[in-house]
Image (cartoon, rainbow, N blue to C red):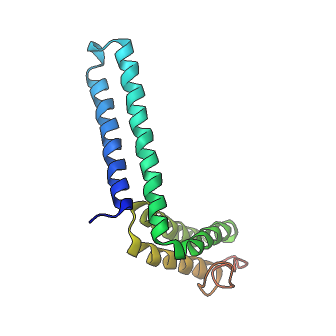
Amino acid sequence: MATSAEQASQLANLFLELSESVDQFRETNAASLSDDDLDSLVDTATQLREVSQQLNGESIAATLDQVQDNVNNIIAATKDAQQAVKKIKKVQNVFAIAEAAASLGAAIASGKIGTIGSSSADLFQAIATATGGSGGAGGAGGAGTVGSTG
C-alpha cells in the first residue's frame, strides 16, 4: 500500500499533468475560443498547478514526518553545505557538494525514505572531503567544521 507521501506525490503529478493538458488544449484551440474562454482556461490551469504545488508540499511534509529522527541532521548538512560552498576554492569540491545536496533534495522530494539517509551521508562526506573534516554530523566538529578552504 502506498504511503500518504507517495499518494500526495502521485496526485501532485496528476494535477500538474492535467494543468498541462488544459494549457495544451487552450493553445491548440485558441483560434476558436473566445477571450473569456481563453482567460478562464488560463485561470483553471493556474489553479491546477497551485493544487499540484500544495500536494507536493504535503508530500514532502509527510516524507519528513517519516524521517523525523534525521531531520536535524538533514538541516545541519544543508547548512554546512552552504557554508562550505562559500569558503572552498576548488570547483570540483563545489560540484561534489552541490550534486550531493541535489541528490538529497531529490530523495526528499520523491519520498524515497531509504535513499534519504544515504544521500544525507553522501552530503556530509562531500563536505568533509571538501573541507578536510571528518564527515560527522553538522556542527559537531565533523562536516560542520567548515574552516578549511579545500
State the residue lying farthest toward the right. 147
Residue 108: percent from left, percent from top? 45, 64
The residue lying toward the viewer, choosing from 100 and 70, is 70
Q: Looking at the rendering, in which quadrant would you find the N terminus?
A: bottom left
| Left or right of residue 90, residue 116 in this image | left
Q: In which quarter of the image is residue 16?
A: top left
The residue lying toward the viewer, choosing from 97 and 25, is 25
Q: Is residue 62 above or below residue 50?
A: below
Q: In this view, does 12 lie above or below 137?
A: above
Q: What residue is at 70 percent from the left and 70 percent from the top?
A: 87
Q: Quadrant of residue 59?
A: bottom left
Q: What residue is at 60 percent from the left and 73 percent from the top?
A: 72
Residue 75: percent from left, percent from top? 60, 69
Q: How many labels does the image show?
A: 0
| Left or right of residue 81, residue 42 in this image | left
Q: In which quarter of the image is residue 47?
A: top left
Q: What residue is at 45 percent from the left and 70 percent from the top?
A: 66
Q: What residue is at 52 percent from the left and 72 percent from the top?
A: 68
The residue lying toward the viewer, choosing from 121 and 48, is 48
Q: In this view, does 134 lie above or below 83?
A: below
Residue 50: percent from left, percent from top? 45, 40
Q: In this view, does 134 lie above or below 95?
A: below
The residue lying toward the viewer, choosing from 102 and 57, is 57
Residue 109: percent from left, percent from top? 44, 60
Q: Looking at the rendering, in which quadrant would you find the C terminus?
A: bottom right
